Structures are given as C-alpha cells and as structure tokens.
Image (cartoon, rainbow, N blue to C red):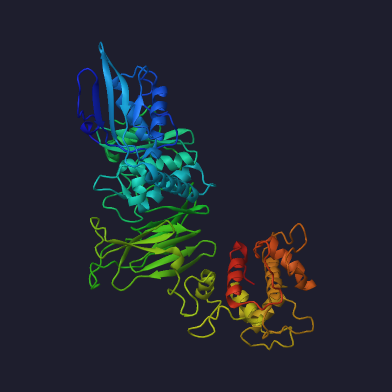
Amino acid sequence: MTAGERFRILSVTLISMLIILCLGFGVFADAPIDEYSSYRSEIPNYDEIYELLYTSATEGETVVLTKGLNIDDKYIVGIFTDLVSSSPELFYLNRTLSYQYSPRGESRYINRVYFSYSMQGKELKEAQKTYEEWINHFVSLVDPSMTDLEKALWFHDYILSFYSYDISKTIYDVYGLIMNETGVCRATSLLYSAVMNRLGIDCTMVISDEMVHAWNIIKIDGKWYHVDLTFDDPLYDRLGRVGHGHFLLSDEEIASAEKGSHTDWHTSISCSEPFKGPKPWDGVNSRMSKIGDRWYYVDNEDKSVKYISTNCSEKGKISDINSMWFVSEAREIGWVGSFSSAAEYGGKLYWNSADEIFEYDPSLNTIRTVWRADESEQIISIAIFNDQLCMQISFNVNEHSYGHIKKVPMSSLYSTVTLPFDDVPGNHPWIDSIVRLYEAGVFTGVSEKKFAPSSSLTRGMFVTILGRLSGVKISNYYSSHFDDVIPGRWYSYYVEWAFENNIIDGMGDGRFAPEKEISREQMFKILAEYISNFKTELSGQNDQGELSFPDASDISSWARPSFLFCISNGIIDVKSGEMLRPQDSATRAEAAFLIDLVSKYPDIIQSRK
C-alpha cells in the first residue's frame, strides 16, 4: 500500500471541494471503536466521528452527513483507515473514500462523506451469512481448553498451512480470502484478528505505509507482541509449511534486520518486552498440531515426526519419514531431503510421504496408512481444511512450484487402503474401527476378500479378539476350566485367560459354548467385566439403576447390571426410544466398533496379563 494509493486526489471543485481518496487496505474487527489507533488521541471527537461512519457503513448508507462535527479534512484519512482496518464485517465497503468540504479560514470542515460498496441487497446478505458462518466455524475449531497462547499459535498455524499469499495482490478482505483461499497480508491479518477477538483475545492489525505491509499485534498474558503471518508463510506457498520466526516478537525484535526490519507501523500500543516463556515453536518450519498435551510437527531436517509439550518439558519422536521424493515420473533421480507436513483431525495426526498418507492415533499409539497416491502422482505436502484432506501433487518440489491441489473428503479415507475386503464400503459407519483392529492383527476376515460385517460372531471369537487386543501370552494358558473348551484350539488360550481374569464365568454348567453365536447381552456382560478388571475407577452403574428402554424387559436378570455399567460409562450410547435388542446376535462390525471403543481407555490397552 503506497502513499499514493492512500491519498490519490481525483477531483476538486472550487467553493465546495469534493475529495476522492483510494485506500489500498482491507477491513476487520468486532469492536466499533479502534482502541489501538495512533490517531485517536490526536483527533477531536474521534469516537463520535468513528461511530457515525461505522453505523452508516453497516446500514449501507452512501451519503453520511457530517456537518456540525467540525471534522477537519486532515483527519478523515486516519479515521477511515482505522475503520476499514478494524471492521472485517464491512468487507463490502470499498476502499475508496469521497468527501465534500467547505473552506473556513485556514480549516476545511467536511460536510459530507460518500461511501460506495462492492455488493448490496440479496448478494450482500448471502455474503454476510457466509462470512459469519466461516468465522464461527474457525472459532469452533479452536479447543476452548487451550490457553490464549496455545490458541494464538494453533490458529496462526492453521491459517498458514492452507491459505496462500495472493501474488496478484487483488484480494484485501476476509470474505475474498475465504472465497478464493488466497489473499494479501491485510486479508490474513484481518482474519487472524477477527478469530482471536471472537475467542476473547485482544488482537488488531497494524499497517506500515513505508513497507506497504500489514500484520498483527496480540495481547498474551497481559503483554503485547507482534505476529506477522505473511513473513511466516514463505513464498511460494506449500501446504503445511509454516514458519514461526515472526510469532510473538517485541518492537525491538521485529524491527531488527534478522526479522525483516519492520518500520513505521501505526498503533498506540507498545510491544516493549520479548516473549520470555517456553517457545515450543522455536525452529519449527511446519504446522504444529495440538492433540491432548502435545504439539506434533514434522522435522524435515531430521526426517521425522516429533512432539513437544507447551512448556517444552516433554519431547520425543513418533516416526521416521523413510521416503524418497523424485524429480520426475520416471522415478530415477531423487531429491535430497524430506518434503512432508502434518495436520490433526478428530484427535489424530496425519502426515505424508511421497506416496502415502499416515494416521497416528495417540490414544492407541498406532500408525497406519490411510491413503496411497496413484503411480502418476507424488505428494509434496498436505493440509486438512474444511473436512478435506488437501494434497499438493507435483514432481517438482523446489520452492517455486505449486503443483496442483487434490482434495479428498476425510470421510473417504480408509476405503481401499488397508482393507482387502470388498464387502466393507468406504462410508461404512464403523470402518475406522474395523481398519484399526484389522491392522492391529486382532480381527481378521472370514476369507481373503470378505469381512462379513453384518454376520454374527461366536463367543469364542469375541473373547479371542479381546485377548489379542490385550497382548495375551498364549503360552501361559494351555489348560481349560470348561468341559467344552479343548486345549490347543485357536480360541482356547484366550478363553482360559478370560476366565482366570474374571472376565467370563461360562454358561453356569461347566460349559462356555465357544461355537455359539454371542448375543448382545452376553457381549455387554463380557465388556463390562473386561473394563471392570482393567479400569477400576469407572463408575460401575448409573445413578438411577433403571433401564428406560422399550425392550428393557427382554434383558436377562444377570445381564441388567452390565447394561447399566455400559450405559453409565459410555459404551452404550443412550438415545431416546432406542431398542437394546439384548437377545439379538451381535454382528462382527458391531463387535469391532465396541472393542475399538473399549481399547481407547488408556490403561486397558496397556494391561498385559
């Protein structure tokens, strides 16, 4: 934004003078008054004038009568600059300002201000609705349990991992950024301010005329710091690549040559002190994703996926990246280095090699492949945005190559990647659980190509899956307490393990009936006993001690406590009017889902008997 762009005088009349100014900046913020303005203390009636302009713009007025406010024309540029710089919701307000004044001695007092708009009517209402939906969506993505520092870091990385810098320099506002997935420094800075303010964190945009640049200042733990998203988003853009060299800097730091020699920014706020706390982002050049108490990221120099806690007290590695990125489809010459990036979704971490996407589940400490690229494709980097896995595809990984972006709904993962079965569709409601147990080697198919998700399973099979999940050492269980469980059978070891650990007690007549289909009430009885033996702190029963289900009377008396236990501990999802179907046979897919759910209790999966 040059001085000429801010002060271009296009026409002048004689007695009443009409001035048209073209300002090269965008819009943003949720506060009607710009508290952080460097102009506010210098301009008489600043608040009254600002309120009038703001209200007029929100109501779509094209002519604003200002006679009697004694607005000297030398002040109008500063006030309008603040308006468009702190009101992102006014994205439809054009960056041109016209006004009319009458000379009075040495002063020139403005009588009217003229606004123009890029859209009006139905088009504007639809755009405003879209704007609000997106801002609310961004806010909903931020974990409310995070500290302000963690929220600021998380959204800084989320924006930069996906949005690109608009090299055409035509998109200045947040709505344009949202719709086009690209924008200049003002657009990203305004979006960052908007979301931070909605989260209750003081943040605003600052402008430097000298640099033709905009960035943010943000208040963390009572102190102000600079955040320059554009300088942390290296050109040319690559999905998931995020720098952190301009996150939480003091005035002195951001003005240094090392940080780009920032100069001439307009604000009344002083960022007087450098950030003195732990910096988990220090030296990281990929998106940082917070899951639980850890931040996960890719270290491409070390060719690994790592984690670090916010206070930097815990560090570690979860996987090496063993992949070669090739120069061409011939795959004869490879690039030196690693070109991976990572992102979280639904409490899991995803990252790429050259031809695969991996998923890490921290609750199970498991890694699996969820996507494989076509032979004609090479994955340079990834981001996850708006429920889509976005992959940057190219055989040219130098920094001046974008390649093209391939988007895949997250719901379509797992469809054919790791399951050899043709009877489990990619949109099966329990496919995640089936994949996890299959990859863990605890639940296989009924044949090479069939899993039979809707078929029943036997009591012996159900107990075997639990035993495999718990890492049972079968050499410890060669005997049998049941007359119908012959030692040495594929399920006998696990049945004996379950008996010795008080998970099962049989049919009551010395038999276990391993080949009999397991009913739902038998399944929940075994699950309740399994959980009770390995997670004693669970609550046991719900407070009411009653089962308010239409078919609750069908439950056998011995199974009622188990149903109460599973309901109170979230194993059974209680929904009004649902049937429990206690006497129905359990299906294989249903068993996979429930066992997978139980496995996520942290100390169950780690128990080894």
Question: Could you tell whether 238 is left or right of 424 in the image?
Answer: left
Q: Residue furthest top?
A: 105
The quarter of the displayed image where residue 212 is located = top left
Name the residue at 46% across, 69% down: 368
Residue 598 location, x and y as percent? 62, 67
Q: Quadrant of residue 5?
A: top left
**On the picture, is 269 further left or further right than 258?**
right
As drawn, is 423 to the left or to the right of 502? left
Q: Residue at x 78, y 61 (%)?
A: 545
Q: Is residue 92 visible?
A: yes
Residue ID at (20%, 32%) = 4
**Where residue 23 sits: x, y (%)?**
27, 34
Indicate the position of residue 214 as horizontal and vertical percent values.
Answer: 31, 38
Say which residue appears at 42% left-offset and 56% top-offset: 386
Tell me the quadrant of the picture where the N terminus can be found: top left
Q: Is residue 39 left or right of residue 434?
A: left
Please say if 280 is above or below 541: above
